[in-house]
Amino acid sequence: MENVGGMFGLGGSGAGGSSEERKKALMREIQQQQSIENARTLIEKINENCFEKCIPKPGSSLSSGETTCLTNCMQKYMNAWNTVSTAYIQRIKSDPSSN
């Protein structure tokens, strides 16, 4: 199991900076991966919810009404997502037990 730490740059001393620097680099990598996963989830949820709501009978092209519905739905969904994400981040930052 000692190689697990090495895979993440956390094993022993040596090249690559201090243990604290390696931890910070790992945290940045995890945050980047989480951001990518959040974006993927957002797109998936928009596709699921807006497609079902705006396109009752899929065809070879979208009507102007379907296009407008999709645009409005995506904007509302992204605004709601951003509002919830911002509130969640603020809550985490203000929670004294998270430090």
Image: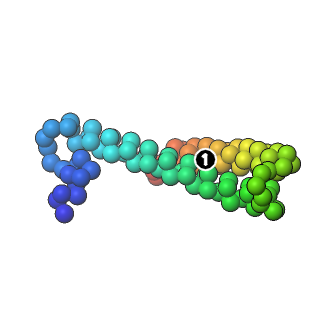
Compared across the picture, whether 22 is left or right of 75 comes to left
Residue 91 screen position, x and y as percent: 57, 47
Residue toward you, 81 or 72: 72
Q: Name which residue lies at 50% across and 52% down.
A: 37
Residue 53: in sight, yes or no? Answer: no
Q: Quadrant of residue 45?
A: bottom right
- The mark tally for this picture is 1
Residue toward you, 48 or 27: 48
- Residue farthest toward the front in the current orientation of the protein: 60
Q: Which residue is mark 1?
A: 85
- Residue farthest toward the left in the current orientation of the protein: 14
Q: Name which residue lies at 61% across and 52% down.
A: 42
Residue toward you, 36 or 16: 36
Residue 78 screen position, x and y as percent: 68, 46
Residue toward you, 99 or 22: 22
Residue 21 screen position, x and y as percent: 27, 38
Q: Quadrant of residue 5?
A: bottom left
- Residue farthest toward the right in the current orientation of the protein: 65
Compared across the picture, whether 53 is left or right of 37 comes to right
Against 64, is 50 above or below?
Answer: below
The amino acid pointed to by label 1 is Ser
Q: Name which residue lies at 23% across and 48% down.
A: 10
The quadrant in which the N terminus is found is bottom left
Is label 1 in a helix, a strand or a loop? Answer: helix
Residue 84 screen position, x and y as percent: 65, 49
> How many residues crowd mark 1 within 10 Å: few (<14), some (14–19), many (20+)?
few
Q: Name which residue lies at 70% across and 44% down.
A: 79
